Amino acid sequence: MIGTLLKISFTNLRRDRVAQAMTFLLPILFFSTFASVFGAQRDPTRRVNMALVDEDQSPFSKRLAKALANEGGLAVRLTSGKNGAGEALDRASAEELVRDGAVPVAVVLPKGLAQGLRLLGRTDAAQPKVQLLADVSDPIAPQIVLGLLQKVSFTAAPDMVANQGVEMFTQYAGELTPSQQSSVDQWKAGRQNENMTGAPPAAGGAAVVGLATEVIDVLQPNKTDTTPVSFYAAGVGVMFLLFSCSSGAGTMLEEEESGTLGRLLASRAGMGGVLLGKWVFLWLVGAIQLTLMFTWGALVFQLPLAEHLAGFFAMTTVTAAAAGAFGMVLATACRSRQQLGGISTIVILTMSALGGSMFPRFLMGEAMQKMGLITFNAWALDGYVKVFWRNAHVIDLWPQVGVLVALTVVFLTLARLFARRWETL
């Protein structure tokens, strides 16, 4: 008896392609996606994009800039155009690159940079600091750049660092004891005779010389909590919007089974009118769903919705329209509610993983970021991030709005083609 039941169960599984995909394909897709994401974080060949501005133009700053450009973990941009084209970056243009999302961080080497070399552990407001103009929605890039900056400050010009260290050591330590002075003199003599470039000896504690630095959040300078709540609202909202639109469009399959769809097609509305009516309904419900999501975020998590209403409504309008049209494609392409449930789960979860709804795309490798652009989610999320995190004006949303409008047209066209099978029944 058990053998017979097993045979029947395996036969049903073999015939159900959707169940096979959810059982065997979907876990592999998710494993591959997240393995690629987290693997990219440990990839030593991955480079962080950054802009560099040299306001000092001193021998030390030039050697430091050259060392940063040669650092394997960084892709340094020095000009306004790509591949060395355009004018040299200044502070304003570098900050604009960060605001636009072209680079996650820009390093500004200020005037009087050599005076910024200090004994670590001391602070002096008069000392110029190397500034990292950062988009802190990417928490990893500024930390990587900061670490590599301190590293190359020692290796780019060790002689200057060492000399500055001796001067500052003497300045801050006051009168040296005979044994301390002897150690310093021995270090100087050894450096001259043996070309030593290490740091000077310490007295009464470490006398390590480093760069004074500060990280400046150029996108949300007045916020104490820099967590991008808008990203999570958009990511979760868009993913569940796709599920709700798919489920709502699936009522056409139920209407087909009950015979209601046939009567609707026989009316003056026709197939075009039925599809249009369903899509407008999904569009409106989707817009309400996203509005409730972001309103909750504003009330509970201080999401600045009131400050970005124009951009929010622009993105919500096109996002809900495209999601509704996508749900229509899934429903018209499937033969049953069960099939729609399985296929929509596979497709939507895969799109959400690649498109950034489950994991920020800026933490993915460059190849996966480009791959994510084939998904609906990526364009919708990029638009919302522009509105809430980058404070973009409505006109600046034209790439995302244009793509989502184009996807809406494509999806509706496909849904109309797939729905022709119902007109021949």
Image (tube, rainbow, N blue to C red):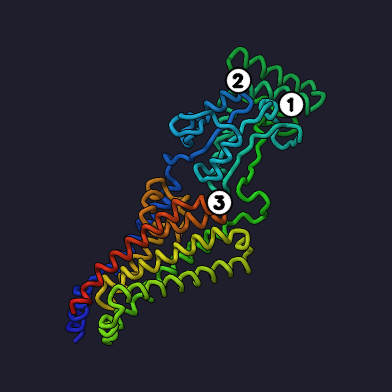
Residue 40 visible in the snapshot: yes
From the viewer's perspective, is 181 left or right of 1?
A: right
Q: Position of residue 58 (x, y in %)?
A: 62, 21
Q: Name the residue under label 1.
A: 169
Real-space Cα separation, disc 2 to disc 3, in angstroms: 39 Å
Instruction: Name the residue furthest right.
Output: 175
Q: In which quarter of the image is residue 301?
A: bottom right
Residue ranking furthest to the top: 193
Quarter assignment of residue 275 = bottom left
Residue located 76% across and 34% down the image: 124
User: Does dot 1 land on a helix, a strand or a loop?
Assistant: helix
Judge left or right: residue 330 versus residue 16.
right
Residue at the disc numbered 2: 59
For the point 60% across and 20% down, the residue is 59
Where is mark 3, residue-wise? 392
Task: Give amino acid for label 1.
Answer: Phe
User: Considering only order in the chain, which callout, 3 or 1, is on the residue closer to the N terminus?
Assistant: 1
Q: Whole-Å distance between the Cαs marked 1 and 3?
A: 48 Å
- Identify which amino acid the numbered label 2 is placed on: Pro
